Amino acid sequence: MDSIPQELVDKIIDNIPQSSLPSCALVGRRWRRKSQQRALDTILFSSEDEVNRWCTDVLQDSDGISSYVHYVGVEVVSWTEPALFSRMLGSLSSLTTLSMYNSEIPDELPGRISRGEFGNGITALYLGFTRYTSATVISMIFSLPNLKELSIRFCKVTPEGPLPTHSVAPQRRSLESLELCGCCNEIGEALAKSRFTSSRLCLDAQIKDIEKLLLLSSKTVVELVLYSTSFLRVPRLSRDHSDRSSRWFRQ
């Protein structure tokens, strides 16, 4: 077994079924790391108890297997101990994608992200089918410095106090994908005011500031999807933008 090149071992592990990874990790020391990396690339938490067990057991592991995680899915309706969520996210140094489905966002989370405690590596944020306060969601979006993909679907965002104001830094890159569908007016307005742009737009026609988002992204967008709309309801573009917009729609 020791005579097999590591590259060949890795190739074998890349092509075995997910269900075989635990057994594969027991073959030998040279098989363990790659097997664990594949097995733990994506983890899902469906309860606060699972998050608590991760923080209690896995984070004590000296091998640092938490660094193998790139995608985390969370479905926790409410938190009795909100700090658990932040503690779990802070342990995942390689996290690139955070998906929250029917899950509460603790109010403390955006602040910790903005202070740089974690989240710099997150490039994709997916939120769906849940309730958030406008201030919490918008603060979280603006706190992620390297965000490339943002999807918010069928969320009931409840206003709570004044919305946070942000300015987009000149070095902020255009998003690769922006999807807003269902009750996202406050978020769409905040993104438009802060001049967020995207090369892929998936928008609900009911979003109040859809025209602003279209105009802001007109030079970069390569794919446009409108939900719940017809051609007759596509927002009219102002005369000042007629030449530019006609070229954009032809593209």
Image: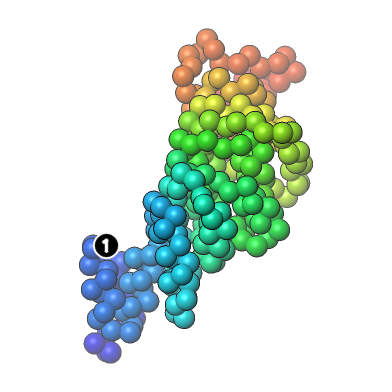
Could you tell me which quadrant the C terminus lies in? top right
Q: Up-down: is 47 above or below 117?
A: above
Location of residue 141 (image quadrant): top right
Residue 229 spot, x, y in % from top left: 48, 17
Q: Up-down: is 158 above or below 242?
A: below
Could you tell me which quadrant the N terminus lies in? bottom left
168 relative position to 89: left or right: right
Location of residue 218 (image quadrant): top right
Q: Residue at x 62, y 52 (%)?
A: 109
10 Å neighbourhood of mark 1: few (<14), some, or many (≥20)? few
Residue 249 spot, x, y in % from top left: 57, 23
Identity, as a three-letter code, of the amino acid under mark 1: Gln
Residue 185 spot, x, y in % from top left: 61, 26
Query: Which of these two is toward me, 186 or 131?
Result: 131
Q: How many marks?
A: 1
The answer to whether residue 224 is seen in the rendering is no
Q: Residue at x 34, y 65 (%)?
A: 39
2 relative position to 61: left or right: left
Colouring style = rainbow
Q: Up-down: is 207 above or below 179?
A: above
